[in-house]
């Protein structure tokens, strides 16, 4: 299995909802990442996990809460989002932090 | 953070080689040069990376200048499927291990 999967593909949520994005890889990679991409812009790093521990938080608002329950799974918990948080959320993994990254197809999030 | 400079856009004809340039004059000795591409409506895709020597893989070749201040991604025969945004990224100690995407080069391939 050489891919990163993300669910759901699309998500629409209200500003008072709580939802979660899921990312999974079975390549034995020990680093996982969350990125946010607005339309026509490059991806922006949000979080990095290395060996299931949070390694980098790019000053992301607390309404985004990452979780890495095991080495194959990465979640992003969403709560009280704003319409400007609507974007494509990308997950990636790499053998170790600092190695080449492999991206999933993303979850397109719309906040209403 | 070390920066890269790429042309905003380039055009190529199908089945012709494409040379995508990248300048990185502030590269540090431990920075790797990574290339990713993003096809429309997809996540970014790793293409190739190198440190000092030229590199080849099944997707592309990477030519690195002797002083490491510039590099060129070479697609040997462009296909319509190669139309994408190509990102040249320095990845290493100068960016504290973060993959920081710039604006990239949008490659258009004409049939």
Image: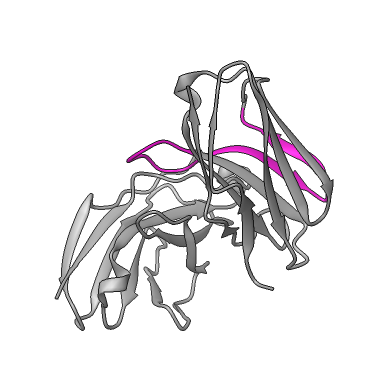
Q: Quadrant of residue B69?
A: bottom left
What colour scheme has been applied to the protein in the rendered image? one colour
- Above/below status of A75 relative to B19: above
> Residue at coordinates 60% horizontally, 47% vertically from top-left?
A8
- The image quadrant where one finds the C terminus of chain B is bottom left
- Does A61 sit above or below residue B101? above
Residue at left offset 26%, top offset 77%? B78
Query: Which percent across, then down, holds residue A48?
Result: 69, 42
Residue A27 position in % (x across, y down):
73, 68
Relative to A13, say whether B59 is above or below.
below
Q: Per the image, is A47 magenta? A: yes
Task: Please name whichever residue, A4 or B68, is drawn nearer the observer in this view of the structure.
Answer: A4
Magenta run includes residue A12: no
Q: Is residue A92 left or right of residue B8?
A: right
Residue drawn where x is 63% and y is 58% of the image: A5
Q: Which residues make up the magenta segment?
A: A37-58
| Residue B67 drawn at (x, y percent) | 40, 63
Question: In front here: A112 or A45?
Answer: A112
Could you tell me residue B24's position as x and y percent?
38, 52
Residue, x 65% and y 46% (percent of image)? A33
Question: Eyeballing the image, is B92 above or below B57?
Answer: above
- Say which of B57 and A103 sits in front: A103
């Amino acid at each position: 299995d050489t891919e990163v999967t993300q669910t759901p593909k699309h998500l629409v949520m209200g500003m008072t909802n709580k939802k979660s994005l899921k990312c999974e890889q079975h390549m034995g990679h020990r680093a996982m990442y969350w990125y946010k991409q607005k339309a026509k812009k490059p991806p922006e790093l949000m979080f990095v996990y290395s060996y299931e521990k949070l390694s980098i938080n790019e000053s992301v608002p607390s309404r985004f809460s990452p979780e890495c329950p095991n080495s194959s799974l990465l979640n992003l918990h969403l709560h009280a989002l704003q319409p400007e948080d609507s974007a494509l959320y990308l997950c990636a993994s790499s053998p170790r932090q600092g190695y080449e990254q492999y991206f999933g197809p993303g979850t397109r999030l719309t906040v209403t | 953070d070390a920066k890269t400079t790429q042309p905003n856009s380039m055009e190529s004809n199908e089945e012709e080689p494409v040379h995508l340039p990248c300048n990185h004059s502030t590269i540090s000795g431990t920075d790797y040069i990574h290339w990713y591409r993003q096809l429309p409506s997809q996540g970014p895709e790793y293409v190739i990376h190198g440190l000092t020597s030229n590199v080849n893989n099944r997707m592309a070749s990477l030519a690195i200048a002797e002083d490491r201040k510039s590099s060129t991604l070479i697609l040997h025969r462009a296909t319509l499927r190669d139309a994408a945004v190509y990102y040249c990224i320095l990845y290493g100690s100068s960016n504290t291990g973060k993959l920081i995407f710039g604006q990239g080069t949008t490659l258009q391939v004409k049939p």
